[in-house]
Image: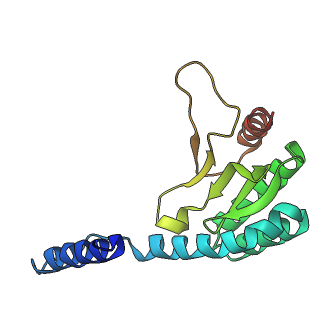
């Protein structure tokens, strides 16, 4: 009887051989995506501590924000202040290297700087754990170019609803 692992290795070698035999460069993950995945692995290792200790999560979020280039850093700092003031029950933590806010270990909302994937705008996103359901269709991510008082009020309302 064949060992299932041997079969998997043979299939994987064949797949690699078939993709490299054409001489074409693989359209795999970008350097930014690889870095995000590596960051996530580090986060998973530290996540147990952060979930049990709010200060650990807060420290990780503040370090991630400090490492951001402007204008993402200023926006992330302001969002952090809004989210922690509006929903203090959410625990700060990092998620794929970005600031995130969780309930019972599950991310509810997160910030993704424009620089991270060379996008033209930053993103405030909400996971499926956010209580934003509204009919059969509702937005789960918002593009952010700047934060004015009106946008800050809208974000606070969204976070309040998401955390409820």
Q: Is residue 16 above or below residue 54?
A: below
Q: Quadrant of the C terminus?
A: top right
What's the coloring here?
rainbow
Q: Residue at x 71, y 40 (%)?
A: 151
Q: Nearer the viewer, residue 98 or 56?
A: 56
Q: Is residue 77 visible?
A: no
Return the x and y of residue 123 as percentages of the image width and height: 58, 52
Q: Position of residue 22 (x, y in %)?
A: 9, 77
Quadrant containing the N terminus in the rendered view? bottom left
Task: Please state if 63 lies on the left or on the right of 120 as rendered.
Answer: right
Q: Residue 31's x, y, as percent? A: 42, 77
111 relative to 70, above or below: above
Q: Residue furthest left?
A: 22
Name the residue located 67 percent from the left edge and 53 percent from the top edge.
Answer: 110
Residue at the far top in the pictured view = 135
Q: Is residue 4 left or right of residue 52?
A: left
Q: Nearer the viewer, residue 61 or 123?
A: 61
Q: Nearer the viewer, residue 34 or 48?
A: 48
Query: Image point 26% across, 69% down: which residue?
Result: 27
């Amino acid at each position: 009887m064949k060992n299932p692992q041997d079969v998997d290795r043979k299939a994987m070698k064949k797949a690699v051989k078939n993709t490299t035999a054409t001489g074409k460069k693989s359209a795999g993950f970008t350097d930014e995506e690889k870095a995000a995945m590596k960051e996530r692995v580090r986060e998973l290792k530290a996540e147990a501590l952060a979930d049990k200790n709010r200060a650990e999560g807060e420290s990780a979020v503040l370090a991630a924000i400090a490492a951001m280039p402007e204008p993402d850093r200023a926006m992330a700092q302001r969002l952090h202040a809004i989210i922690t003031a509006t929903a203090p029950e959410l625990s700060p933590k990092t998620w794929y290297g970005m600031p995130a806010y969780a309930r019972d270990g599950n991310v509810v909302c997160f910030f993704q700087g424009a620089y991270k994937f060379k996008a033209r705008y930053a993103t405030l996103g909400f996971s499926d754990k956010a209580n934003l359901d509204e009919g059969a269709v509702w937005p789960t991510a918002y593009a952010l170019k700047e934060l004015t008082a009106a946008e800050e009020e809208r974000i606070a309302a969204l976070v309040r609803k998401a955390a409820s």
